[in-house]
């Protein structure tokens, strides 16, 4: 079955408008599946790290959100042990008008947090709440763990 025109256009835009520190490749066998490699954001506990993510567009995309998760283990209160990201636009707040390009940008900037603590936690979505308190009191330990 051919891909919808919207997915083709958005894939073209992802290829054309490269983002610093992000490499996105469409899977050779499944054009709805994307391999993402992201450099840890500068001036963050993740600086110097290389993180692998996967992004999948469900059959009813854009009426439902893409599925995005970290494949690289991540120490962050909004990312669980399976790599699932708690981000409004990936949950019930997804708008079909939101382009894939911006979903990837949101995921990139979501990781750009200098101190992961209560203010960085997604409200109502404590995926890894136990990770939140120690970093606020001991930011050096966050850098060691991230």
Image (cartoon, grey):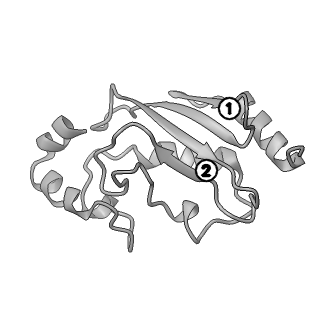
Disc assigned to residue 125: none
Q: Position of residue 123 (x, y in %)?
A: 38, 71
Q: Position of residue 6 (x, y in %)?
A: 84, 49
Residue most extreme to the left: 138
Side of 136 where 128 appears, left or right = right
Task: Identify the residue at horizontal 66%, vertical 40% (top origin).
Answer: 33
Task: Identify the residue at horizontal 16%, vertical 51% (top origin).
Answer: 135
Q: Position of residue 48 (x, y in %)?
A: 33, 25
Side of 138 where 7 appears, left or right = right
Residue where numbered disc 1 is placed: 27
Quarter of the rendering containing residue 58? bottom right
Task: Identify the residue at horizontal 58%, vertical 71% (top origin).
Answer: 92
SS for callout 2: helix
Q: Position of residue 14 (x, y in %)?
A: 70, 35
Side of 121 where 31 appears, left or right = right
Task: Identify the residue at horizontal 54%, vertical 49% (top origin).
Answer: 68
On screen, 12 above or below 105?
Answer: above
Mark closest to the chain's N terminus, 1 or 2: 1
Mark nearest the camera among 1 and 2 is: 1
SS for callout 1: loop
Residue where numbered disc 2 is placed: 103
Quarter of the rendering containing residue 18? top right
Instruction: Work out whether residue 48 or residue 25 is closer to the camera in this orientation and state it.
Output: 25
Residue count near mark 2 (Cα–Cα under 10 Å), binned few <14, some 14–19, many ≥20: some
On screen, 143 above or below 7?
Answer: above
Residue count near mark 1 (Cα–Cα under 10 Å), binned few <14, some 14–19, many ≥20: few
Q: CA distance from mark 1 to mark 2?
A: 18 Å
Side of 34 where 91 appears, left or right = left
Instruction: Work out whether residue 118 or residue 24 is closer to the camera in this orientation and state it.
Output: 24
Quadrant occupied by the C terminus: top left
On screen, 20 above or below 81?
Answer: above
């Amino acid at each position: 079955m051919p891909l919808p025109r919207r997915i083709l256009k958005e894939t073209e835009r992802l290829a054309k408008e490269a983002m610093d520190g992000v490499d996105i490749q469409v899977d050779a066998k499944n054009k709805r599946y994307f391999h993402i490699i992201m450099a840890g954001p500068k001036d963050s506990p993740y600086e110097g790290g290389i993180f692998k993510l996967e992004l999948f567009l469900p059959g009813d995309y854009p009426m439902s959100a893409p599925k995005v998760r970290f494949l690289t283990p991540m120490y962050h209160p909004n990312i669980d042990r399976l790599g699932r990201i708690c981000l409004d636009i990936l949950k019930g707040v997804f708008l079909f008008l939101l382009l894939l390009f911006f979903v990837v940008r949101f995921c990139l900037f979501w990781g750009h947090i200098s101190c992961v603590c209560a203010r960085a936690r997604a409200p109502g979505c404590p995926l890894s709440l136990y990770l939140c308190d120690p970093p606020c009191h001991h930011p050096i330990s966050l850098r060691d763990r991230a």
